[in-house]
Image: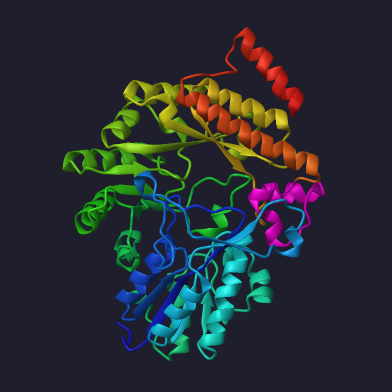
Amino acid sequence: MYPSDKNLLLINPWIYDFTAFDLWSKPLGLLYLASFLRQQGFSIQYIDCLDKYCADYEPRIKKYGIGQFRREVVKKPKILDHIPRNYARYGLAEATFRKRLQQMNNPDAVLITSMMTYWYLGVKHVTQIIREIFPTIPVILGGVYATLLPEHVQRTIQPDFLVAGPGETKILRILADIFNLNFDRFKIPADIDNYPYPAFDLINHPDYLIVMTARGCPFDCSFCAQKQISMPFTQRNPDKVVEEVDYHYNHYHLRDFAFYDDALFINRDQHIRPILHKIIEKRLPLRFHSPNGLFARYIDRELAELMFRSNFKTIRLSFETSNEERGPDMHGKISNQGMVDAIQNLLHAGYKAKDVEAYVLMGLPGQNVEEVLSSMIFVNNLGVKVRLASYSPIPGTRDFDRAVEKKLINPNVDPLLTNKSIFPLTSSKEVYNTFRQLRILSQLLNEAADKNFAPFGDTKIGSSIRSVVRSML
């Protein structure tokens, strides 16, 4: 153990964006880091700028604990003036953040995490305030933005230390150097299951909890940067996962758990099936949610039944597109027939089609409107809801390189212009409006799915509607 007189402040910064919502959104990596550093002997203080239950705001909580952040409209960055929407800071009022800083014990170091690259203004503003109030305290920045765009971070944020990728060992080395401590590599857990549970006790008024059964992803999809962000794909022992869920349920008495895995169903028979079997055996009255897309091709009859019996409530499938020519780019996650089979298995298990959502990607390099529309119609014809996801060009991915080759984006683009909310590869107001119309159409299709109605079904009226929509787009 390191000396416990060293006090660390961990911060989850604000989001600056056109829209943001707490959809089982917790800084799990930061909470893991907090418990790990506690285990090493450091004292931990924590501020979550995205705390829904801030002093001057009454959150509207929807079912399963999700809800709205406090929203404050702020001046839009000049580079985004062409977007006809209000820009906002989500989370604590700045005065509340400052008050919390002034009321706490002075930290010996401040650790700030970062998420989406186009949210860097929140990181920047937090860092500026920290340096104003604690001018001599070292600032350590890690997380997704720090990993993907280290040069931009150094220019824009100028942290004292930058940590790219998984941070436990790197941060421990930095702290040992800062405080003149002897770094002991044998203090680092050798196995993923030997890390302490996330420090959920730091969360003010938790509505739900997070569980992660593996780190990383074995795939390398053209639009995803997971390979750059996380450690090599490593799955936990199913028994250890269930022990953790059981512990947190009994400790916090919360029923809703969201899986944060990027590849929850990989190695299905040795991993997720044993986990769900044991959850069922324990008769835990839980509800499970999958904000990250599930790989539908692994959903056979047995897994679908286990999902239903263990009370999987939120099911979001990684479909992306009905254009099967993109299959190699997406590692053949699912074929159109495979999607049909997965839905049939879920229906057989007891789900209704409208209980299921499928991610459809919009705005990929070289992707035309017809592909997006066809994918949406394919999903709706299955009775499933469309979860339309706008593409964000992430440096280091194949699709980012393609966008650069097609001159759709500058290789040194300001991250603010990669925001998925603005459809970043669009080049005209007309195309921007088309994407917005597609989003409205997805909402209408989902309302139809709630009524078990597929307006684009293989009927005469469906063909007519499709023709009309094509002409409008």
Residue closest to the far top: 460
How many tags in the picture? 0
- Magenta residue check for 421: yes
Pick the residue in front: 393 or 54: 54
Please give left or right for residue 438 compared with residue 252 in the image: right
Q: Can you say which quadrant of the picture contains the N terminus?
A: bottom left
Residue occupying image coordinates x 38% and y 25% = 352
Can you tell which quarter of the image residue 132 is in?
bottom right
- Magenta residue check for 235: no
**Which stretch is magenta?**
397-425
> What x and y, as percent, mark residue 44?
36, 78
> What x and y, as percent, mark residue 465?
66, 17
Residue occupying image coordinates x 57% and y 23% = 378
> What x and y, as percent, mark residue 236?
33, 52
Residue 64 higher or lower than 74, as above or below: above
Residue 426 higher or lower than 88, as above or below: above
Q: Can you say which quadrant of the picture contains the C terminus?
A: top right
Residue occupying image coordinates x 30% and y 66% = 201
Residue closest to the far left: 282
- Kindly tell me whether residue 271 is visible in this rendering: no
Please give left or right for residue 387 compared with residue 411 in the image: left
Please give left or right for residue 384 compared with residue 235 in the image: right
Q: How is the image coloured?
A: rainbow
> What x and y, as percent, mark residue 416?
68, 60
Pick the residue in front: 8 or 428: 428
Pick the residue in front: 152 or 438: 438
- Kindly tell me whether residue 31 is visible in this rendering: yes
